[in-house]
Image (cartoon, coloured by chain):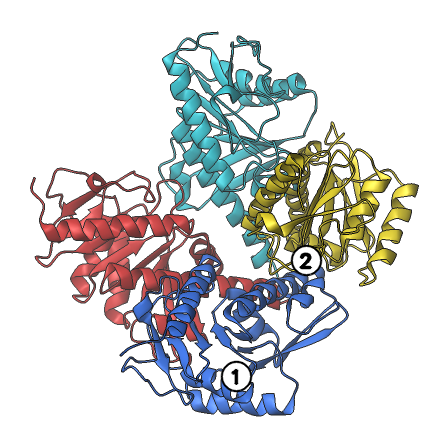
Chain colours: A blue, B yellow, C red, D cyan
Amino acid sequence: MVYSEEFFILANQLINAGRFIDSKGWVPATSGNFSARLSDGTIAITVSGVHKGHLKPEDIMLIDADANSLDNKKPSAEAVLHTSLYKRFPQIQSILHPHPINATLVSRIFRTEIILENYELLKALNDINSHESRVVIPIFANDQNIPRLAEQVDQYMVNKNMSPAYLIAGHGLYSWGNSVNETLRHLEALDFLFECELRLRGVKNQ
Amino acid sequence: MVYSEEFFILANQLINAGRFIDSKGWVPATSGNFSARLSDGTIAITVSGVHKGHLKPEDIMLIDADANSLDNKKPSAEAVLHTSLYKRFPQIQSILHPHPINATLVSRIFRTEIILENYELLKALNDINSHESRVVIPIFANDQNIPRLAEQVDQYMVNKNMSPAYLIAGHGLYSWGNSVNETLRHLEALDFLFECELRLRGVKNQ
Amino acid sequence: MVYSEEFFILANQLINAGRFIDSKGWVPATSGNFSARLSDGTIAITVSGVHKGHLKPEDIMLIDADANSLDNKKPSAEAVLHTSLYKRFPQIQSILHPHPINATLVSRIFRTEIILENYELLKALNDINSHESRVVIPIFANDQNIPRLAEQVDQYMVNKNMSPAYLIAGHGLYSWGNSVNETLRHLEALDFLFECELRLRGVKNQ
Amino acid sequence: MVYSEEFFILANQLINAGRFIDSKGWVPATSGNFSARLSDGTIAITVSGVHKGHLKPEDIMLIDADANSLDNKKPSAEAVLHTSLYKRFPQIQSILHPHPINATLVSRIFRTEIILENYELLKALNDINSHESRVVIPIFANDQNIPRLAEQVDQYMVNKNMSPAYLIAGHGLYSWGNSVNETLRHLEALDFLFECELRLRGVKNQ
């Protein structure tokens, strides 16, 4: 298999993203998976079963738009959750799925969605220009049947405006953006906002 | 544009301050902005839209006392909040505005001010010599209209004694001092004191 | 004393495990102890009384299957807790006993066991394939009489299915796996899950 | 001024202790002070007003048993709290006074003392051999009059058995041991135990 220079550049961005994400404690054990879309529509994605904080170049593989392996490596079992979003939204160029404790707790405390408002940091999310905006992050039930879960997410997205991320109950966070860097900025902002909401619940209501 | 040696020294202090502040998690995404005043009254300030934990020399720019760009770079949208304080208080030489989670939570739980007393660490704040002092940090409503917000802060400052910092609701902390280093000391002390107050509320009242 | 190459390889893995575990704050003061089994049934184990975050090669010693020293060094007072597990379960190749604050709190809040369910991260534990699994971690009363404590644990294990770990009240966590690396993965996952359960109790029931 | 080799060895231990203590966040701003006793009864102690995480050799000075400067440097305002303990207990060779948030919160929530029991980690404290021990840490009211505060502590110590540390309300922790290293082990254990007690109060009583 010969990989393009574009693949290596994106693979390197995913490796560095993994190091940053792990330094925050957001990919315990071998949880999480990351991807970035190439200009020809193929997708660089992490292989199954490795620690996302210590990715090596050979841990990034290539799949087509339908999640088929193009290099005989085995992609994450959740690859279809990535390809399904890439198909629906042409502007998405990267998807990062970490497993932060704040996102996991939010997904179990808030039932179907969490609403974020009155935070200046909302402006770190794409297309948000004021703290007076209202951002809704949907929460889906966890499901080991990944195509069924992908279908459920896709149905939601076609009916609503695109949110910057979604949660799966007990299972962490999917976030995306027009580059690996923008997606990292979304992750950093969302973790901050989730922690605020959790601590406000714990501190305020006593 | 030719910059003075004084500019480079202060710019370097702001870059190092950003690294320290980011290591504490106080500037998530691209939040926050920092400045320092030169002896001729011009001001070194961070440009708009960069991550404050990884500042490069070209991310620090020069404005005049009215927040006009002197080098064709674009200052932070909140530059007027800096210049307004520098005008009011000649002793202020540096202003650091991070976005710590403790300050954000304090600004949403306490309504118009937070009162700090009975802490030895109050002595880390300028002009405080005993834990028996009482320090009041005002909290202002957030406003995307920055000149209007600056005016509101300025009105408060003219009527009251100078506090070592103020909060904007859901928007972090403005702190200042007679040098970048003194301002960092204020930030470190205030974050500690805010966390104490938040945890005392959570731990004590049960 | 001459040690085998296998001993040095495993000793090195325990030293690195200690560095990682200490970076998480899981071995305060001189708490904790670690071991790995060699192919001839002897066991590499940490000596008594050293800080587990800064292990040197000479801090790892060799004992036989009954916890007798084979190199005149003094093993941890809790060595019998290791040998007892190795005897009962031939598939266990490494045992790590850190002292994390989350495990300590879980052991004092939950009485005889903690039940983990509805977490995707359960799949990081050996033989777990779905978040719908139910994992029971037993909690034993602390006892300075280590043989008596080992006997109590052994009785539990013979009656129940093997859990991936057990807790001792006020005393941290024993975890194991088929390699040092797998055991570290278990520790990382269990600490995450314990923190979730603790924070859910604190955040939810208000 | 010529310093002995023993002074330099102890000064170096205090510098390294400060780096470790700062990495834990236990000396915010310029809080805290550290000392170690030399064999001739003089005391190496940190000077006033520096950040304890970045100590330089010149930030450690020499005082006599009555807290008089022997090298024209200015010792911490709290030097008498050190010399008073050294006089009372000949076995004490080092005193470390950091300002951790857990100790500060404990000092404000528990009134006159905190009692620690049923923790295996108690065995990290000098002379404790079982989790069934009961350790009492006294809490004194803060006082800017340091000789008066030292007198109050000394009265307590003469009447009771020696505890491994004491707290001053809103002001952090004084801890000691027969070496800098043993004192660090006490600090690490006490911070863990204080955090347990604080979190047990927050988690349990709901």
Q: Which mark is residue B48?
A: 2
State which quarter of the image contains the C terminus of chain B: bottom right
Image position, residue B118 (x, y; %) = 72, 36
Toward the front, the furthest residue is B1
Give the residue type at disc 2.
Ser
Q: Are marks 2 and 1 in contact (CB under 8 Å)?
A: no
Residue at disc 2, secondary structure:
loop
- Left or right of D135 on screen, residue C46: left
Image position, residue B141 (x, y; %) = 82, 59
Q: Mark 1 packing: few (<14 Cα in 10 Å), some, or many (20+)?
A: some
Give the residue type at disc 1.
Ala
Which quadrant of the structure image shows residue D73?
A: top right
Return the residue nearer the eye: C82 or B163.
Answer: B163
Q: Look at mark 1 in the image and give the residue it sits on.
A: A141
Can residue D106 be seen from the camera position used here? Answer: no
Where is A37 relative to D28, above or below?
Answer: below
Image position, residue A14 (x, y; %) = 43, 68
Nearest to viewer (mark 2 / mark 1)? 2
Residue beneath the point at 72% across and 63% down: A120
Chain identifier of the residue bearing label 2 in the image: B
